[in-house]
Every structure is written in structure tokens, then in C-alpha cells.
Amino acid sequence: MNNLQLHSLNTPNGLKVIIALAEIGVDYDYHQIDISKGEQFTEEFLQISPNNKIPALIDLQGPGGKKFSLFESGAILIYLAEKFDSPLLPKDAEFRYNTLVWLMFQMSGVGPMFGQANHFINTAPEKIPYAIERYTKEAQRICKVMDKRLSQVTYLAGDSYTLADIACFPWLEFYERDLGLSEYQHLSIWYKHILERPTVSKIFQGLNN
Ligand SMILES: N[C@@H](CCC(=O)N[C@@H](CS)C(=O)NCC(=O)O)C(=O)O
């Protein structure tokens, strides 16, 4: 049994952690939580994720050598990068805080807004034009913010790939399929760049097979 036990699913929030673990190169055990079957509401899962959402992580060798569990994908990414001393959370102060800025931007903006856009476009039982327009426009606005940022820097936090890129990428992957990214020149380049990373392409090829 590995120390790290990931309880998750192949959704954008779940994939962030799967990508980070692959980039760091650490072994873990995977427990799939099928949210379409309500498995996020079991007592066992609520003990590690009281907000009934994936992903959640248990570290059998957490702080102080004790078992520790955490939820919220952004917190899990920071935990893993710090635990394994990964450059995905840079040491340089400016670069580190820029990583956190763009990670928070993902957690508060990209995830919730793209998630609602995806819901109202693809899964809502009725098509509600107001909701589709509201969240599509917000997702487009967010893409413009990212596109502008990526006209100035290669990766969201600066010169190299960090947790911020990992957190945003799976959402952009869904966006590319739903709405297309071609109108965002710099964001499209960033997207292709990340998709070409061996770790990332392996994960997404696995999903599409
Ligand atoms: N802010 C949370 C959001 C997690 C989240 O929304 N997870 C979704 C799947 S992507 C979920 O588990 N939904 C199940 C539910 O809402 O019942 C995070 O980033 O971890």
C-alpha cells in the first residue's frame, strides 16, 4: 500500500491532482469515487471530504508522521508540491506568489464558471438561455484574461510550468471541446504546449481510449 491514497474521478478537479502526482513522479493508490452514482455522499467519503466533492487525498505519512487527509484540489496541489519539494511551487518569492495568485484565480474563477457553463450547455435537464449565456460569457471573459496574461509570459505564473498551469489545464481541455480556443491566440499556444508534455498527453490519451 502506498502512503498516498487518492479518492477521485477523471473530472477537471480530479485530473489536476492526477497530473500533479504524475509530474512529481510519486506512486499512490487510486480509489475511484463515482459521483454519478452518489458515492461522494457515503459516510466513509464524507470523513475525508466533508463538502462531498472529489478530489480528496489521504497521506498515511502526513505532518508529524501521522495520517492526514485533505480536500479542495488547490490545497492538495500545494500540499503535494511542498511535501515533495517540487519546483511546481517555486521557491523564489515573486514566482511563488504569482503561482498562488493564478492558482486562486483558477479555484475561484475558472473552475466555478467553466463548471456552470459546462453544466448549462451539456447536462441541465432544460436549456435555459439566460444561464447558458451568463456562464458562457463569463468563461469567455476568463479566457481573455488568461490570453492577455499569456501574451506577456510563457506560463501563467512566469517562465516555467507550475501548479497554476496544472490547475487550469483540465478546465481548458473541456472548454476546447465545448466552445473551442482558436480565437485566443496565446491561450491556444499555452494549451498545445501543455498537452504536448509527456505526462499530460499520456493521461489524456488514456481518458480518450
Ligand atoms: N473546489 C473544489 C470543487 C470540487 C468539485 O466541484 N468536484 C466535483 C467534480 S469536478 C464533485 O465532486 N461534484 C460532486 C457533487 O457536487 O456532488 C475543488 O477544487 O476540489
Image (cartoon, grey):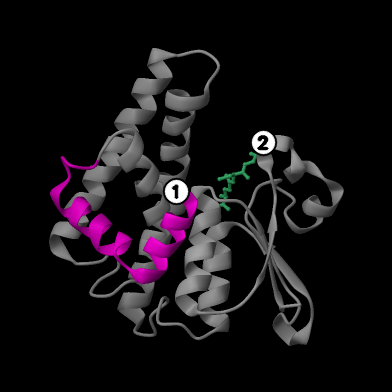
Q: In the shown orientation, is residue 154 left or right of residue 170?
A: left
Q: Is residue 208 highlighted in magenta?
A: yes
- Within the displayed image, which quadrant is ligand 1 positioned in? top right
Whether residues under marks 2 and 1 lie with C-beta atoms below 8 angstroms apart, the answer is no
Whether residue 104 can be seen here:
no
Bin the neighbour count of mark 1 within 10 Å (Cα to Cα): few under 14, some 14-19, many 20 and up: few
Query: Which secondary structure, mark 1?
Result: helix
| Residue at 17% from the left image edge and 52% from the top image edge | 148
Q: Residue furthest front?
A: 209
Task: Left or right? Give the position of 144 relative to 81.
Answer: left
For mark 2, give the secondary structure: helix
Q: Which residues are magenta?
A: 181-209
Residue at 23% in and 75% down: 159
Which amino acid, mark 1?
A: Asn
Residue at position x 30%, y 63% in the image: 194
* Residue toward you, 34 or 135: 34
Which image quarter: residue 98? bottom left
Most common secondary structure along the magenta stretch: helix
Residue for badge 1: 208
Q: Which residue is mark 2?
A: 36
Amino acid, disc 2 = Ser
The residue sitting at the right extreme is: 43
